[in-house]
Amino acid sequence: MEIIGYIASILIGVSLGLIGGGGSILTVPVLVYLFGVNPVVATGYSLFIVGITSSVGTYSYFKKGLVNIKTAVVFGIPSIIAVFLTRAYIVPAIPSEVFTIGSLVVTKSILMMIIFAVLMIAASYSMIKKDKAKKEEEASKQTFNYPVILLEGMVVGILTGLVGAGGGFLIIPALVVLSKLPMKEAVGTSLVIIAAKSLIGFLGEGAEVQVDWTFLMTISAFAIVGIFVGTYLSKKIEGAKLKPTFGWFVLVMGIYIIIKELFLK
């Protein structure tokens, strides 16, 4: 199982480099089901892995001038604050047994995985649907809908803090629609935001979480190898064509997690 886990860790980076996002949605399931990490701990570990991998991924976008710093700051600040506060205060405040339905006891771990699975299903929809905004790639005059951007940044930050996913599938459409960024620039800017909020969110981890740094750095290293492979493949394969297929895979995974956590315990 561990060997499969390391291969899957490479695939996290490959998907990030190839389709510009979505890889982080695999991190928690890989940690929980292939390495046996507790779901609550896994969401924290995921923040670190996603943060480090996204940081490496931003290099090529900076090099091509496809990162909008102003947008990253406007969207990133509320998101960073929200993810840090979520990891530092909201996650520790969730009781170990949340509620009971008949004979089913919904624990903190089960709740985290269900929220994560719902987010996976939402992410799969954004990957599967056909992008009608392709023709709007040309850069138009950038405008900022500040109240909506701040609110969206906070929502993405809270979700990231709860489930440990980067939230690129939420950030990229927001940057295109609310900030009028061309798609490629939105992807690069999104990676910068994801890297910053994930790493700072990880710093909000409570002292009760004992971090296995050897394990964490090993998984991160495999994911980083994957992002280099994905970036190389992106020059030969059009990532947009693979996105729907990856979306269907994520959808199946999300449904599987819900069934496993609620009915197969």
Image (tube, helix red, strand yellow):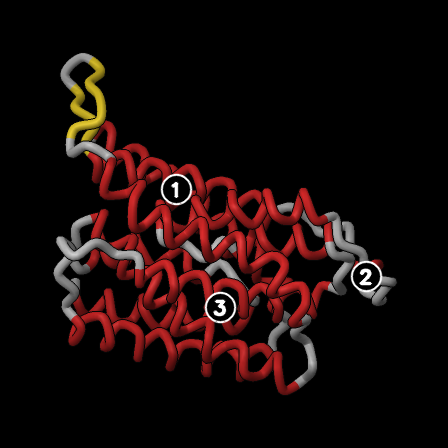
Residue shown at 77% from the left, 50% from the top: 132
**Left or right of 2, for residue 122:** right
Q: Earlier in the sequence, mark 1 or mark 2?
A: 2
Residue shown at 23% from the left, 43% from the top: 92
Relative to 182, does residue 37 appear above or below in the rendering?
A: above
Check disc 3 and report the residue beneath it. 16
Check disc 1 and report the residue beneath it. 254
Relative to 256, does residue 88 appear above or below in the rendering?
A: below
Specify whether residue 177 is in view: no
The secondary element bearing badge 3 is classed as: helix
* Distance from the alpha carbon under mark 2 to that under mark 3: 26 Å
Specify whether residue 31 is in view: yes
Residue type highlighted by circle 2: Gln
Q: Earlier in the sequence, mark 2 or mark 3?
A: 3
Residue type highlighted by circle 3: Leu
Check disc 2 and report the residue beneath it. 142
**Left or right of 215, for residue 137:** right
Q: Position of residue 131 (x, y in %)?
A: 71, 52
* Distance from the alpha carbon under mark 1 to that under mark 2: 36 Å
Label 2 neighbourhood size at 10 Å, few (<14), some (14-19), many (20+)? few
Q: Position of residue 164 (x, y in %)?
A: 36, 53
